[in-house]
Amino acid sequence: MQFGRFHSMVLIALGALLLTLQAYMIFASGANTPRPRPDETSTTESKAPVSTGHMFIYLPGVVGLAMVGLGAYGVAQRQREIIAHADAKEELARHSAPNYGRR
């Protein structure tokens, strides 16, 4: 694959961006929740119901982690191809060179 390493690096960068977005979403949602005052008693009636949008708060993190994993896998595969090609080239050069009676 000609652009395998480039695409893998782009996947890693986009995954890191999504993981950063995930961290921001988690910390921003924690800052917006009202904290009870010490003199107030907490009851189960005062708790707000969980919205359905709360399910998707971890989606950027999961997708970002998957993208970073795929990008790292792509970089590793491309590196293996480069090493295998260099080894094959070295082996070919070693066997095709005249040895003039040497082993």
Image: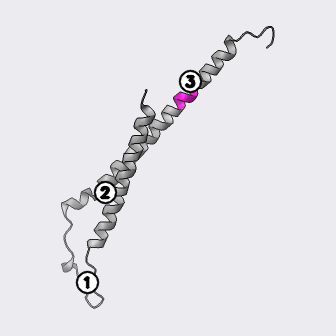
Say what secondary structure mark 3 lies in: helix
**Residue 57 image offset from top left, x and y in percent:** 28, 59
Residue type indicated by callout 2:
Tyr
Q: Residue at x 28, y 86 (%)?
A: 37
Q: Of the numbered discs in the image, which one, if any, rests on residue 11?
A: none
Residue 35 versus residue 10: which sits nearer the camera? 10
**Which element type, helix, strand or loop, lies under badge 1?**
loop
Question: On screen, 55 above or below 42?
Answer: above
Which residues make up the magenta segment?
A: 80-84
Question: Where is mark 2, residue-wise?
Answer: 58
- Are discs 3 and 2 less than 8 Å apart at CB? no
Residue under pointer 1: 42
Percent of width and height locating residue 27: 34, 66
Quadrant of image for the N terminus: top left
Q: Is residue 10 magenta?
A: no
Taking 7 as reference, is 97 left or right? right
Label 1–label 3 contact, CB within 8 A: no
Whole-percent x and y of residue 56? 25, 56
Q: Nearer the viewer, mark 1 or mark 2?
A: 2
Q: Return the residue at label 3.
A: 85
Closer to the eye: label 1 or 3: 3
